Image (cartoon, grey):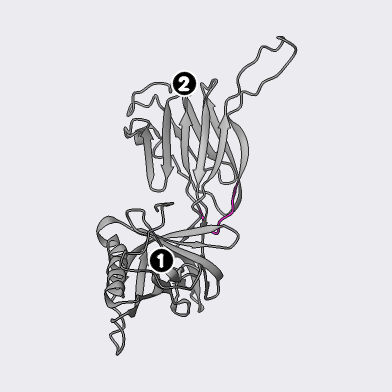
Amino acid sequence: MPLIAAPVVAPPETGEPPAGGGGGIILPELGRATVTYYDPTGVAWPLTTRALGWTTLAEGVSGLGAAPYELTTDARPRGGARLRHVQAQPRSIVWPLRVFGNTHMEFVTRWRVLATAFTRTLREGPGVLEIARPDGTRRQIAVFYEQGFEGQGSRGTGWISDTAVMSLFCEDPYWVDPVPLTVHREQGVGLDFLAPYPSVSSSQVLGATTVMNPGDTVMWPEWTITGPASLVVFTREDTGESFTLDPNAPEVGHGNLLAGEQVTVRTDPPQVRYQDGENWVGALDWPTAVLWGLDPGTTPITFQLDGSGPGSAVDMVFNPRYETA
């Protein structure tokens, strides 16, 4: 999903915005939060700042809790059922947005630009809904407009105010921390053991390390390998799952990675790219390769680089994923 930081949109120039209201609302079961929607172009639309001419009606918000799941079961011969598989399902978020203005045209202009900001997700790709907490932490989810920007259609609405009760469709039901976590391992620079005095330098890009996933569900990291290196092996020690990147594989035909050359491996969806964008998926040790993810909590892993030297490095980057906002 896109992880976005963008300038805040200004209210449409149709007169002075209405007075009153600060940022933040009390969301059902989640407490106080400030909410921002980022449209597909990256423009930020605060949804809890009344002074802009629109605000969220907290009592109608839903769909921010744990992800929905589909359970597959097998009947037991003597009654009951055995759980065979659990599959997370897309979620739907209901978001009521009250829009108003001092004049009819001020209201209409705001209504139109907000409708466009949401419906353009159906043409240009997902927007992002962000929930920010008083401690500065944020969680985001990619959304598509589904329905609901029609207004109430009742007496007194549609002149200087109305409410859109939107349904937002989320392909991935999990919330994502937009601040990535990084694990970096780099080859030490060799030193002469006797000059100017006895010393030992680390040559370890490699070896064992423990990675902490603070999220609620499996996360799928992205790896960047920086040469020199002739072979790279990534192993999850608790399961034995591993994959190997071989720049000398016939499908690639590149030869050893030279100093500063980089290859990026994505685990979900699987993708391997050399620094110029060339497809290097053939450099993996198929069919035995397993592009493993990290479960919540700590996971022991090992990086192994053959042919490493000064500047060799491995970087693992991931964004924790959560059940709730």
Q: Residue at x 41, y 73 (%)?
A: 18
Give the image location of residue 122, x and y in percent. Answer: 27, 62
Does the stretch in magenta take in 213?
Answer: yes
Q: Nearer the viewer, residue 101 or 202?
A: 101
Q: Is residue 10 left or right of residue 240?
A: left
Q: Position of residue 185 (x, y in %)?
A: 57, 32
Pointer 2 local density, CA inside 10 Å: few below 14, some 14–19, many at least 20: some
User: In the image, what residue occupies the spot 41% across and 66% down?
Assistant: 89
Q: Main secondary structure of the magenta part?
A: loop
Position of residue 258 relative to residue 12, above or below, is: above
Q: Which residue is mark 2?
A: 259
Label 1 belongs to which residue? 89
**As drawn, is 97 to the left or to the right of 228?**
left
Q: Residue at x 30, y 67 (%)?
A: 14
Name the amino acid, label 2: Ala
Mark-to-mark CA distance, 1 and 2: 44 Å
Q: Which residues are magenta?
A: 212-218
- How many marks are shown on the rendered structure? 2
Quarter of the view holding residue 165? bottom left
Numbered disc 2: secondary structure: loop
Q: Residue at x 65, y 15 (%)?
A: 191
